[in-house]
Image (cartoon, grey):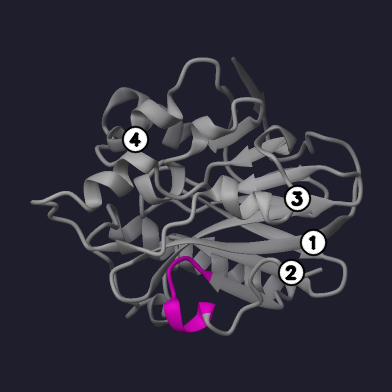
């Protein structure tokens, strides 16, 4: 089941964002955090952003012959949410920034949520042209899941805007959260994986980044947004040193 929106329409009515929780659900390699985020509004709405790895990928990572980087400190996102008093059935909306295994492996744990994703990313994954998404297709393509496809920058609810930032994969999206006390917080996700990657011209391109030209354009777009919106905090996708300085759940930004 699909519904569609454009960049001018909010989907869920008015509501002030109250709290942003940062949850670390695993570590890749030495220090790269695998994040999930929870937004709670004063209306009682729960918006989850990304879900981390699937249990199957975690099991495979510990099997003999696994060829990827080690995965440590795994805590299922449902357990992180439970520690905040939130059950899977209480997640109203799940923002899938993209369908890489470290971001979309537990989507099927939230069958009641509406899953919001860029149309370009969803169609690339469904067609098989996004090879990494195929690794967890059983999770994000499980029967009964409800997808909401968006095209480009989209206000999801007042205070939460999806920012199309292709390059890491087609149809990647970052998220801007306007908090009443902290101010605007930009979740760059994998458009800017680390602070060291933020330089528009010289910032590193990771081997997992599929399109360097598009990625550098997306980084430029985010830098312009930071200035235009007066962003108070940009959170990079997998920056271990930065994550050691941030407030992690059960603490929160408001």
What is the quadrant of residue 207 in the picture?
A: bottom left
| Secondary structure of residue under mark 2 | loop
Residue 128 falls left or right of residue 174: left
Q: Kindly report the distance in space between the C-alpha atoms of the residues bearing marks 4 and 2.
A: 30 Å
Other-residue count near label 1 (Cα within 10 Å), few / some / many at <14 / 14–19 / ≥20: many
Q: Nearer the viewer, residue 182 or 79?
A: 79
Is the Cβ of the residue at disc 1 closer than 8 Å to that at disc 2?
A: yes
**Of label 3 and label 2, which has the lower sequence position?**
3
Q: Which residue is label 1 attached to?
A: 19
The image quadrant where one finds the C terminus is bottom right
Residue 174 falls left or right of residue 240: right
Residue 213 position in % (x across, y down):
32, 59
Instruction: Please say if 30 is above or below 158.
Output: below
Q: Which residue is label 2 attached to?
A: 252
Residue 244 position in % (x across, y down):
53, 82
**Of label 1 and label 2, which has the lower sequence position?**
1
| Secondary structure of residue under mark 3 | loop
The image quadrant where one finds the N terminus is top right
| Secondary structure of residue under mark 4 | helix
* Residue sitting at x 12%, y 55%: 67
Q: Kindly report the distance in space between the C-alpha atoms of the residues bearing marks 4 and 1.
A: 30 Å
Disc number for residue 136: 4
Q: Kindly report the distance in space between the C-alpha atoms of the residues bearing marks 3 and 1.
A: 14 Å
Residue 150 appears in the figure: no
Other-residue count near label 2 (Cα within 10 Å), few / some / many at <14 / 14–19 / ≥20: some
Q: Which residue is label 3 attached to?
A: 85
Q: Kindly report the distance in space between the C-alpha atoms of the residues bearing marks 1 and 2.
A: 6 Å
Q: Which residues are magenta?
A: 236-243
Residue 10 position in % (x across, y down):
79, 38
In this view, the mark in front (4 or 3): 3
In this view, the mark in front (3 or 1): 3
């Amino acid at each position: 089941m699909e519904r569609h929106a454009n960049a001018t329409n909010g989907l869920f009515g008015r509501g002030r964002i109250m709290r942003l929780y940062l949850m670390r659900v695993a570590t890749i390699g030495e220090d790269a955090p695998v994040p999930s985020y929870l937004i709670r509004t004063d209306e009682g709405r729960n918006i989850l952003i990304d879900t981390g790895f699937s249990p199957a990928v975690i099991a495979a990572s510990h099997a003999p012959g696994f060829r990827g980087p080690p995965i440590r400190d795994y805590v299922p996102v449902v357990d992180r949410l439970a520690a905040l008093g939130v059950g899977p059935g209480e997640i109203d909306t799940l923002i899938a920034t993209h369908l890489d295994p470290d971001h979309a492996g537990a989507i099927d744990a939230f069958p009641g949520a509406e899953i919001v994703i860029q149309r370009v990313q969803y169609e690339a994954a469904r067609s098989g042209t996004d090879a990494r998404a195929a690794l967890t297709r059983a999770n994000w393509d499980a029967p009964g899941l409800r997808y909401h496809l968006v095209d480009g920058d989209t206000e999801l609810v007042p205070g939460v805007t999806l920012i199309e930032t292709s390059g890491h994969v087609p149809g990647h999206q970052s998220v801007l959260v306007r908090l009443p006390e902290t101010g605007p917080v930009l979740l760059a996700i994998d458009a800017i994986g680390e602070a060291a990657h933020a330089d528009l011209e010289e910032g590193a391109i990771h081997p997992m980044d599929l399109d360097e030209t598009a990625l550098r354009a997306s980084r430029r777009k985010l830098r312009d947004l930071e200035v235009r919106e007066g962003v108070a905090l940009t959170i990079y996708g997998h920056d271990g040193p930065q994550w050691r300085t941030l407030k992690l759940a059960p603490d929160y930004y408001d």
